[in-house]
Amino acid sequence: MKSMFDELFSGLTQARESFEPELAPREVGVITSIATGIAKVSGLPGVGYEELLKFPGEIYGIAFNVDENEIGVVLLGDYWHLQAGDEVERMGHVVDVPVGQNLIGRIINPIGEALDGKGKLVTTERRPVERPSPAIMDRAAVSVPLQTGIKVIDALIPVGLGQRELILGDRQTGKTAIALDTILNQRGKNVLCVYCAIGQRASGVAKVISTLREQGALEYTIVVVTEGNDPPGLAYLAPYAATSIAEFFMEQGRDVLIVYDDLTHHARAYRELSLLLRRPPGREAFPGDIFYIHSRLLERATHLSEELGGGSLTALPIIETEAQDISAYIPTNLISITDGQIYLSPALFELGVLPAVDVGKSVSRVGGKAQRAAYRGVTVDLKLSYAQFEELETFARFGARLDDSTLKMIEHGRRIRACLMQPEFAPVSMVEQIFVLVALTADLFDDIILEDMPAAEKLVRDAAVNVSDELIERLNSVNKLNEEDKNTILTLSRQALIAFSSDLVVKDQTSGDAI
Ligand SMILES: Nc1ncnc2c1ncn2[C@@H]1O[C@H](COP(=O)(O)OP(=O)(O)OP(=O)(O)O)[C@@H](O)[C@H]1O
């Protein structure tokens, strides 16, 4: 009979034979020095460029300078507790972010940590933050408009899905407001939005988020945030991480809009990191590859071909200029990378012309092809009249004596400007915009005194509410506005203005007499 000892012994032998130790190599180095957002690490000769490294206290870093004896690491978290001699571990992969449906409506940081107090993100997939942009053969032409809901942009500087349109201007000129209004206008249009705040004040970011929430836009928006006091590494990473999140949806065939607010802070964060890493500085102390960090980011925005699902990623990068200098280093870089720019003028802002878009300095290089045909018939005249007005207005300021036709042009231009003005968070539908533009080009507003213009413009927009579904369909189609529809719009607009005639002096278009 087997003794208890034998049973125990055979059990132990079996356990020993089936034991397989879980061995995983760990490559560990040490911090040799640490400075603002940067750590120098030695003892990790096999580290690859942009590989993720783990520091004590769950802090991560990216290997940026990969030298033979020492690597320069950009830190991605609160690093105050780190010191020379601490252990650093290789992670064996590059930085990645969680992606997926569960991110919609969430506020996260660039490494995928939730900032909204709604608990940890639950996703199954992760994507590297840096990815090559789609090849030319994988791209389709920009052909579908992205309605911003801002009259001056949709009419004169249209943006298409898959386009990259720069928003630039001095500080406090309404840059964020333009981007925010565009996001608000995507409600019900099946365009997903990603708002990436880079190095901004916490109060500014909180304001944007509360606006998105109040206006019901957070339901279809993902917010990626780095604040001004975060380490520069996080600010550098933010736009790439946000783009990877957006690309996930684009590759599922969806239309995505991404706002980078703003890339001036991004360029500054990269300059700070490069100087700390002792990379050679160039113009304005920026490193030599400053163009490349933005070009490789914005090249990822595109309209994918039908074979790849036909999704699109439209980018609205924002840049802050100093003293209206649009030919400074970073603004010119971005102007040359993007497909057009919307320039916001502080002079117009001070005059109360809001949004302060300077039409003369703004351009959309591909959006015109994507613009709805209904706009095209009316905006050609408008652009010309507005350009002439801006030129003539300068002369009028000197008190020069002007002939009747010039005065008429100036008065017409003033009404165009009044019609294109718009408050924040009040996007205008395409049909309402067409009504205002048709009425403008037919000179319906020319006899209305300037002070009454906001009320008159609103009446014309209100007239658009009751139009037939067939007319709305025709306005949305690829065909130009036909004469019959134009006349319907004009009749409705005239009626709307006549109804206001107790306050306004409206002249009948045919007789020229006051009604
Ligand atoms: N269309 C508008 N109507 C009324 N007010 C506006 C409009 N656009 C912007 N504003 C106001 O102008 C101010 C500046 O706007 P915003 O913060 O968008 O500018 P910014 O250029 O992004 O500023 P910053 O330089 O701080 O990033 C805000 O107080 C905003 O409410």
Image (cartoon, rainbow, N blue to C red):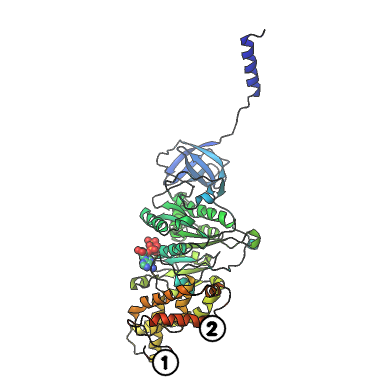
Q: Is residue 89 above or below residue 165?
A: above
Q: Amino acid at mark 1?
A: Ser
Mark 1 vs 2, N-terminal side: 2
Callout count: 2
Q: In the displayed image of the protein, which residue is found farthest to the right?
A: 1
Quadrant observed for ligand 1 in the rendered image: bottom left
Foreground pick, 439 / 22: 439
Q: Position of residue 95 (x, y in %)?
A: 53, 47
Q: Would residue 468 be found to the left or right of residue 320 on screen?
A: right
For this rendering, which residue is in front, 180 or 101?
101
Of residues 109 and 228, which is closer to you in this image? 109
> Quadrant of the rendered structure where residue 367 is?
bottom right
Query: Where the N terminus falls, by quadrant?
Result: top right
Relative to 28, does residue 372 appear above or below in the rendering?
A: below
Q: Which residue is mark 2?
A: 483
Q: Secondary structure at mark 1?
A: loop
Residue named by callout 1 = 511
- Furthest-top residue in view? 1
Please indicate, yes or no, whether residue 386 appears anywhere in the rendered image: no
Give how far apart the Cα atoms at labels 1 and 2 are: 21 Å
